[in-house]
């Protein structure tokens, strides 16, 4: 798409969870749009493979091992970006954890692990990158990946749903506090993205794929590239006047319960993953 060409030229982006799935999809799209990339994750082997792909595309890219639950490691990733490229203009807080377990059977540790990765990790990314984003000559961009299930209730995923709802509140607060510093803060809420490991575990492996498709008016699962294009929009000049927003990219799933061609869904099913 022509609007993407050179849309991020000169900009440096740090993407957590960048070794696979949505994070890698965003990284590839950013590379195609002229961005320089720093990918962070706990799995350095996976990161190195992703960075190799980006370099084959002609992009400047760097892999940094970082666990977003550890603030010092996130700070180190930000320093690595600054040392390598001299600036940091975009941060995509994408690292996340999730697994299905009913709340009545969820251990306190299971709750804590997901909250630590999703919510605390997002705060760590924001706090560690604030000064660098404030100094960006393009106007800093901070984007966190949320979910359309964040505000619906999410049976089986209470920890992830609560964390993502917290992320939405956090980012809206940051938009208000950091707007005067020129930093735009937004969330992107994907629906069912078919080419990810999460979709395989949550939908395909559980025999839920057809149920999910029935709730999507566009009749197909999304792709990581759909999320990546939304991220380019928010991080380029096209997003200069957008902050505090939650950009939903779900093929209409939120409205699919009563949309054209979608079956009626009982209230107890509205939060199903």
Image: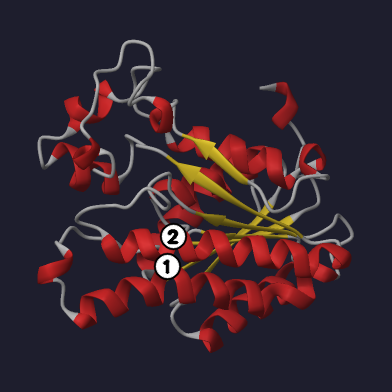
Of mark 1 and mark 2, the one earlier in the sequence is 1
| Disc 1: CA contacts within 10 A as few (<14), some (14-19) or many (>=20) | many
Query: Viewed as shown, does residue 121 lie left or right of 173?
Result: left
Query: Viewed as shown, does residue 12 lie left or right of 153?
Result: right
Residue 133 x/y as whole percent: 77, 67
Between label 1 and label 2, give the one nearer the viewer. Answer: 2
Q: Nearer the viewer, residue 43 or 136?
A: 136
Residue 126 visible? The answer is yes
Q: Nearer the viewer, residue 159 or 229?
A: 159
* Label at residue 19: none
Q: Residue at x 60, y 37 (%)?
A: 230
Rounded to the nearest angstrom, the CA distance separating label 1 from label 2 is: 7 Å
Quadrant containing the N terminus in the rendered view: top right
Tell me the element at label 1.
helix
Labels 1 and 2 touching (C-beta < 8 A): yes
Q: Residue at x 35, y 37 (%)?
A: 192
Residue 21 x/y as whole percent: 39, 48
- Please identify the residue farthest to the front as the structure is shown: 267
Q: Quadrant of residue 137?
A: bottom right
Name the residue tied to disc 1.
Answer: 118
Q: Quadrant of residue 41?
A: bottom left
Name the residue tied to disc 2.
Answer: 164
- Please identify the residue farthest to the top as the structure is shown: 261
């Amino acid at each position: 798409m022509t609007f993407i060409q050179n849309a991020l030229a000169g900009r440096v982006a740090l993407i957590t969870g960048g070794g696979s799935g949505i994070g890698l999809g965003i990284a590839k799209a950013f590379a195609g749009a002229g961005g320089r990339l720093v990918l962070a994750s706990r799995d350095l082997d996976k990161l190195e493979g992703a960075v190799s792909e980006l370099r084959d595309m002609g992009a400047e890219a760097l892999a940094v091992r970082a666990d977003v639950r550890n603030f010092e490691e996130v700070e180190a990733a930000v320093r690595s970006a600054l040392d390598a490229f001299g600036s940091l203009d975009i941060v995509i807080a994408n690292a996340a954890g999730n697994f299905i377990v009913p709340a009545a059977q969820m251990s306190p540790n299971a709750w804590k692990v997901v909250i630590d990765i999703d919510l605390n990790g997002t705060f760590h990314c924001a706090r560690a990158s604030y000064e660098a984003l404030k100094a960006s000559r393009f106007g800093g961009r901070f984007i966190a990946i949320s979910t359309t299930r964040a505000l619906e209730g999410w049976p089986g995923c209470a920890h992830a749903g609560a964390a993502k709802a917290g992320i939405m509140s956090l980012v809206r607060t940051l938009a208000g506090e950091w707007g005067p510093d020129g930093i735009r803060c937004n969330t992107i809420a994907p629906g069912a993205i078919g080419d990810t490991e999460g979709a395989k575990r949550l939908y395909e492996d559980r025999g839920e794929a057809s149920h999910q498709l029935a709730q999507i008016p566009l009749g197909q699962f999304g792709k990581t590239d759909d999320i990546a294009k939304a991220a380019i929009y928010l991080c380029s000049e096209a997003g200069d006047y957008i902050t505090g927003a939650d950009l939903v990219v779900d093929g209409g799933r939120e409205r699919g319960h009563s949309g054209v061609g979608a079956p009626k869904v009982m209230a107890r099913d509205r939060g199903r993953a």
